[in-house]
Image (cartoon, helix red, strand yellow):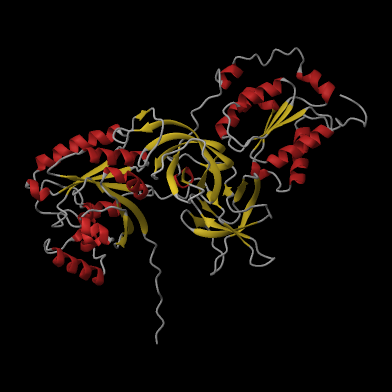
């Protein structure tokens, strides 16, 4: 026997797309034709469809039966749930969700479209753009799907008229632009005969674009890119023996390699990746979508629900968040009722603090509302019992989405999409504006006088989520007679720079350890306080041990002349 070298084929790209349209627009028929012409149907499936078609006497072959998987659906002649199909071509792999067209199944379309990279919206060439077409476009925009393919179907029933197609294209493209969907493609098809579905049709020579399958094979995929921020929710801690500790989960976004710095949330402790072990040996890297185990250089207190991120690319961390909810339960929303929120690998208690508005899915306009019922969409503020680590849904669907669960019945009552920031402001005047009106430099004491009295200058130390380290540093500096204070909050704040300026003007050493701050806030704080008095600490530059990190920071303060090395007070002396 002669040994043959086998070439490993490159992994195919994956595109997830969803279909939607009005009743009888031909969604299931189009997808069935797509599967059939791309030779993605097994013989036994095809035989079952032929048998059902003969029994129903609806023509030579009913392609819709390739996606309508439930007997109840076939008996009613409509699709009442989301049917998923998987198929591939030589160019890429596909997951298609055939979603229902009825108004009362808005929740089903939202479910099918939640992970889609692209939406295929069908429009019957005879009827033109319908209210449901606009609704589906609105939901597509609401779910952040960046691309829309408007398939004008049943062109055979309008004599393949270019004027009909152009009129629909002009009307619907204007609607898409109003919704903020700027990337769209219009394709005229006859799904029953296969015109422009897989192969281009000679019956419409005026159309010079690609067929539907050609476009799907070349459309960009919005899978998380390697350069996106690292988000690795820990699903399980692996301890097969005393010599191995690994953290298993799926990378939501970004990539990770051995040697990369990572921060564990919520503790804020930093370390580096030691290895990415697999059954076949260690991997050189792992990227978004992969389920892997990570081994770290240091033993940290990490459990299920924690998240590993890059120290310089932190998510938002908060117990209060604003989200759009798609209500999925017969029992309406109840304010301040206990729910469970399932977010990445966390399951924590939550409640809905307020309902701001209901969203009109025909226009995306917001109107006041007192309750959400089945299939309604609303804007709410939620409060959770533990902080969540998240990005806005428009930035990262994996960390920006969640589901709400009834803790009594275990039923999923809603799906949510996290917005940028809570809209509610503190009572009375805006807090940032109020702080901005204060005169921070009204004290007649100079920094030099404070140094002579307390042994240190006013200073701001900006840490990244090292809460325990902040308090240990506070203890160390206090033991040396320093006037020191820690600001370590679990929720986000927009007034940290102003607060830093206020505390600095009072002569304090202030240690900030707020998990939700970003680089822009840090830069603004440094500008307000002054570079001389501001210590920006890069998490990856600190030792993993809090004791070593305290020593490192104390020496840095002395090196900069902010704290006098001999500033310890004799026992019994006051300040």
Q: Nearer the viewer, residue 167 or 533?
A: 167
- Residue 539, by quadrant, is top right
In this rendering, position of residue 185 left or right of residue 459: left
Residue in the image at 79% along x and 30% along y:
563
Q: Is residue 64 above or below residue 461?
A: below
Q: Is residue 253 above or below residue 132?
A: below
- Residue 395, by quadrant, is top left
In this rendering, position of residue 434 left or right of residue 119: right
- Residue 451, by quadrant, is top right
Q: Nearer the viewer, residue 116 or 552?
A: 116
In this rendering, position of residue 333 left or right of residue 49: right
Q: Nearer the viewer, residue 298 or 33?
A: 33
Residue 72 in percent (x, y) is at 26, 59
Image quadrant in which the C terminus is located: top right
Residue 570 in percent (x, y) is at 92, 31
Q: Nearer the viewer, residue 124 or 149?
A: 124
Residue in the image at 89% along x and 25% along y:
574
Is residue 313 at least partly visible in the picture? no
Is residue 62 at least partly visible in the picture? yes
Residue 495 in percent (x, y) is at 59, 26
In this rendering, position of residue 97 left or right of residue 198: right
Q: Residue furthest bottom?
A: 1
Image quadrant in which the N terminus is located: bottom left
Residue 231 in percent (x, y) is at 52, 48
Numbered marks: total: 0
Q: Residue furthest left?
A: 159
Q: Is residue 326 above or below residue 483?
A: below
């Amino acid at each position: 026997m002669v040994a043959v070298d086998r070439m490993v084929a490159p992994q195919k790209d994956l595109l997830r797309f969803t279909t939607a349209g009005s009743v009888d627009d031909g969604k299931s028929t189009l997808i069935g034709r797509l599967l059939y012409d791309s030779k993605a149907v097994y013989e036994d499936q095809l035989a079952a469809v032929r048998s059902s078609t003969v029994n129903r006497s609806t023509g030579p072959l009913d392609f819709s039966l390739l996606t309508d998987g439930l007997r109840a659906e076939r008996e009613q002649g409509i699709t009442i749930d989301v049917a998923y199909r998987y198929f591939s071509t030589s160019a890429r792999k596909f997951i298609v969700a055939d979603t229902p067209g009825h108004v009362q199944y808005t929740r089903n379309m939202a479910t099918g479209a939640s992970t889609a990279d692209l939406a295929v919206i069908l429009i019957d060439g005879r009827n033109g753009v319908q209210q449901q077409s606009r609704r589906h476009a609105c939901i597509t925009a609401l779910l952040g799907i960046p691309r829309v393919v408007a398939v004008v179907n049943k062109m055979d029933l309008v004599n393949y008229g270019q004027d009909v197609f152009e009129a629909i294209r002009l009307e619907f493209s204007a609607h898409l632009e109003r919704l903020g969907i700027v990337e769209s493609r219009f394709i005229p098809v006859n799904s029953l005969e296969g015109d422009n579905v897989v192969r281009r049709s000679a019956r419409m020579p005026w159309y010079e674009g690609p067929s539907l399958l050609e476009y799907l094979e070349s459309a960009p995929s919005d899978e998380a890119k390697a350069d996106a921020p690292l988000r690795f929710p820990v699903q399980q801690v692996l301890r097969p023996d005393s010599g191995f500790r690994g953290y298993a989960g799926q990378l939501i976004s970004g990539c990770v390699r051995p040697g990369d710095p990572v921060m564990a949330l919520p503790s804020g402790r930093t370390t580096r990746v030691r290895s990415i072990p697999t059954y076949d040996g260690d991997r050189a890297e792992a990227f978004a979508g992969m389920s892997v185990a990570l081994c770290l250089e240091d033993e940290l207190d990490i459990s299920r629900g924690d998240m590993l991120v890059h120290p310089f690319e932190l998510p938002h961390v908060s117990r209060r968040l604003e989200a759009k909810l798609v209500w999925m339960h017969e029992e309406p929303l109840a304010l301040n009722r206990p729910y469970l929120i399932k977010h990445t690998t966390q399951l924590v208690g939550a409640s809905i603090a307020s309902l701001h508005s209901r969203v009109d899915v025909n226009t995306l306009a917001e109107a006041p509302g007192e309750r959400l019922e089945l299939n309604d969409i609303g804007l709410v503020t939620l409060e959770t019992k533990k902080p969540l680590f998240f990005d806005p849904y428009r930035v990262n669907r994996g960390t920006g989405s969640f589901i709400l669960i009834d803790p009594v019945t275990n039923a999923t009552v809603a799906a949510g999409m996290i917005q940028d920031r809570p809209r509610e402001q503190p009572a009375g005047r805006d807090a940032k504006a109020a702080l901005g009106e204060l005169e921070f430099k009204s004290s007649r004491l100079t920094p030099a006088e404070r140094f002579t009295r307390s042994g240190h200058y006013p200073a701001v130390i900006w840490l990244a989520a090292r809460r325990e380290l902040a308090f240990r540093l506070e203890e160390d500096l206090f033991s040396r007679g320093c006037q020191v204070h820690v600001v370590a909050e679990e929720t986000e704040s927009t007034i940290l720079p102003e607060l830093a300026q206020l505390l600095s003007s009072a002569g304090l050493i202030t240690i900030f350890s707020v998990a939700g701050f970003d680089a822009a806030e840090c830069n603004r704080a440094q500008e307000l306080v002054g570079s001389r008095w501001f210590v920006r600490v890069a998490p990856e530059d600190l030792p993993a041990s809090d004791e070593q990190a305290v020593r490192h920071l104390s020496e840095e303060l002395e090196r900069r002349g902010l704290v006098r090395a001999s500033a310890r007070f004799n026992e019994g002396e006051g300040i």
